[in-house]
Amino acid sequence: MSANGTELRNEEPPADEILATAIRRRSAILFVGAGASMAVGLPSWQSLIDHLLDELHLQPDVIDGMHSGYQMLAEYYRLKRGGIGPLRSWLDRNWRLDPARIAASRLHQVIVELNFPTIYTTNYDRNLETAFDVLGRPYAKICNAKEIASAARGITHIIKFHGDFDDDGALVLTETDFLNRLAFNSPLDVRFRADALGSTLLFIGYSMSDPNIRLLLHRIWQTWEESGHGQDRPKSFVFVAQRNPVQEAVLANWGITTIGPPDDMAADEGLTRFLLTIRQRLDCEE
């Protein structure tokens, strides 16, 4: 009770403080989506759709009404061409950025400097790896069970949740690939479930309308609820480009706090500034 007899409330620390504490304790995970790569000039999903339509000699209206139409188009490509090797090669050539551009990205620089013990990404590109390379920071890239077992400890693990361009078989690109992942029981899924149970999570660069990421967030919540210890779950956060009260309410029900940029600030700038506030807290605590 306070001096005037009113009850004192314990206010929750701000998101940047919670995340800084978790990073310092080596119990924080960063999950990076396509928005982070597009911030440094990577083409959007529309460029992939346009390429597939051209390669398959299809009219644009063929994907009208499809959500994430590139997945069905990639599935059709695999059926017609017998594999996705040429498509993977095209992506590798066209989604490769000049390392100098990534080195100049304040967003990527601060991601590396924050020194998350684990970074998951659904991006196929090598932008995160390049950022670590140009800044001279060690990391281990993980795409499969073998790499889970062999990854060196004590350095950042960059887990390519949907694969990358080095392995056609690891890519989660076609509709069948995504549907298979709904089982949530691949080696990378098992690793993620184990990581998520004891870690504070931050998701950046995602659209919360993406059903795949929403399923992932729901599964994390479900795992905790079924454990009987949901009240003990570490905090989870998602930084969104634009606030939406409906999405925020649904995500809050799953135990996920939504963060967005100030009204007068672009999403990329707002995200970079938010990550910098975490970095500043870490610097002050050293």
Image (tube, rainbow, N blue to C red):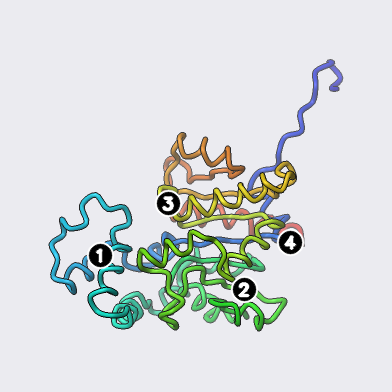
Within-10-Å neighbours for mark 3: few <14, some 14–19, many 20+: few
Within-10-Å neighbours for mark 2: few <14, some 14–19, many 20+: many
Q: Mark 3 points at which residue?
A: 211
Alpha carbon distance from label 2 to label 4: 16 Å
Give the image location of residue 33, x and y in percent. Answer: 46, 61
Q: Nearer the viewer, mark 3 or mark 4?
A: 3
Q: Which residue is painted at 24% across and 79% down in the image?
A: 81
Give the image location of residue 82, x and y in percent. Answer: 28, 80
Residue in the foreground of this view, choosing between 231 and 27 = 231
Which circle's residue, 2 or 3, is located before the other in the chain? 2
Q: Name the residue under label 1.
A: 49
Which circle's residue, 3 or 4, is located before the other in the chain? 4
Q: Do the residues labelled 2 and 4 touch (CB within 8 Å)?
A: no
Q: Looking at the rendered structure, which numbered label has been put on residue 130?
A: none
Q: Which of marks 1 and 3 is in front?
A: 3
Which circle's residue, 1 or 3, is located before the other in the chain? 1
Residue type at mark 4?
Arg
Instruction: Identify the element where label 3 is drawn.
Output: helix
Alpha carbon distance from label 3 to label 4: 32 Å
